[in-house]
Image (spheres, rainbow, N blue to C red):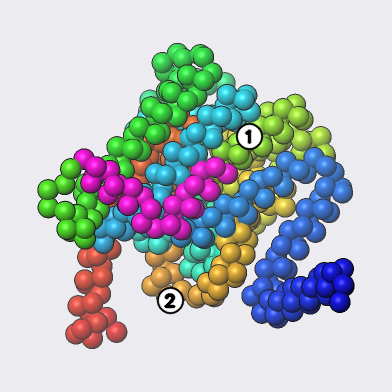
Amino acid sequence: MSIKNQESTTAVTLDVDTGNKFAAWFAQKQNRYVLTIIGLVAICSAWALSNDTRWIYLLVYAWFGLIYGMFLQYGRFCMASAVRDLFAVGVSRMAVGVMIALCLYSLVAAVVNVSGFGTFHPQPLGLHIIIGGLIFGFGIIFTGGCASGSLYKTGEGNMGSALVILSISFSQAFFVNLGNWSDRLAPASWAASALEKDMPVELSADHGWFDLFTAGYVWDLHAATLADMLNVTQPIVRSFLANSFLVTILPASVILVLLYKFYFRKGYLRKHKIEQPEMRNHLQGIWAMIISSKNTAIAGIGLGVFAGLHVWATGALREHYDIFNFGELLEDMGYTSGLSIQGTVFDPGYWYITTQEAQWGAWVMEHMGMDMRSNIFFGLDNGIPNPLINAPGFMSIGIILGAAILALLRREFKWKLPSMETAVFALVGGALMGIGARIAMGCNIGAFFATVANGDPSGWLFLLGMVGGGYVGVKVFNLWLTWRTSQLDDGSFL
């Protein structure tokens, strides 16, 4: 046989083997589901772009959501787990992964900001961040997942996590729309300050506690990155030194050292039989702690990098279309019914979770006949767009689908129906998370992860509150478990 014929035969054999392997792969039900999800995303994306290429702005949110979902599921990456594992069982793995992701996100964000495509806006600095974080942190212990964790766990088939999302959505929508009966719960100074603002007439007649909190308290606070506080203007120094290194990398490194000292060091030295450790032993121990869970570390790296790239992508699109907010594109395309008074919708330009879920709840409540726009949160700022044209909303949906894809591929997808107790915890804990997120003006992603990574020190206040709330939540949850066990033992719980 000639060399040419041998090569041809080899190629045919390889094609047959490849075909057989694909047929065997396709024969598995989970893999067909994966192809179905990917196919639907591709078809819907192509259909949207064929109607109007400006839908690329919404699709960027959706596609990055898919990526976030995959990394979250791959590393079982959840800040509720990080807090719970630390205080309940003394395991630092997830907390280490969060710090790694935070540092990498800050470096990519610095590059994006130097390039001029940054979309981040700092949070007003005040005690409300700690208070909201405390409530949020308490809630996540009972739900078993943070805002992002609940989304990816829903993608794994966990219907208890889906209840958490449902509760977060409606609790926020209800909380920001309490109405003027709740005015008496606000300090008089908030009401006086709010009334001094030049509020639109549509809002001025129907204040509520959250409106007075927003206009009379939050708007009077100062919002700035560390570079702004230090009046640093040189782009590289501003982004890399002030906002990335001083706000993110340095504090995160200190936290990693503390995690090693209090949670990892003893076990590491005992395992390696080191009785008189030197500095090099501790450095090796810190590195061992970082790589102790490969999946979590990889997830942290991926989330950090892609969260930064997301900022670049939305910033580049805003410059391309010469817009400040997605509401401008929606208005140009003829979709005006969901816009706020200012012609805006919620469009952070980076990874964010809870506000779009509040919009989902408000959209449903509005279609049930409730007035959901006589407030600052929806009426003035974020609007209530149809979920089919809600760009950040598609990011959350993308997280669910991305997690589902990877869970199916890894044979980790399983429908899980909650027990009555779990369902109650999901609904109550989710409501606390929603209220905490609104008081703090964000969740574990928007008020901490993305905030700190972009040079805003206020994010550390949220983490402080979330950790404190989580600590109390673990103690309360353990008391509940002890009580329930005692009730089961004597039969009275039944």
Q: Secondary structure at mark 1?
A: helix
- Decide whether the magenta segment is chiefly helix, strand or loop: helix
Residues packed near mark 1 inside 10 Å, few (<14), some (14 to 19) or many (20 plus): many
* Residue 271 x, y percent position in the rendering: 21, 60
Answer with mark 2 or mark 1, whichever residue precedes in sequence: 1
In the displayed structure image, the side of residue 77 where residue 384 appears, left or right: right
In the rendered image, the vertical position of residue 342 relative to residue 41, given as above or below? above
Q: Percent from the top left, x then y, of residue 134?
A: 33, 46
Q: Which residues are magenta?
A: 279-306
**Residue 45 in view of the camera:** yes
Q: Position of residue 200 (x, y in %)?
A: 62, 27
**Disc ID at residue 197:** none
Amino acid bearing label 2: Ser
Quarter containing the N terminus: bottom right
- Residue 312 tag number: 1
Residue 304 covered by magenta stretch: yes
Residue assigned mark 2: 419
Residue 263 in the image: state x and y as whole percent: 24, 53
Q: Residue at x 12, y 52 (%)?
A: 275
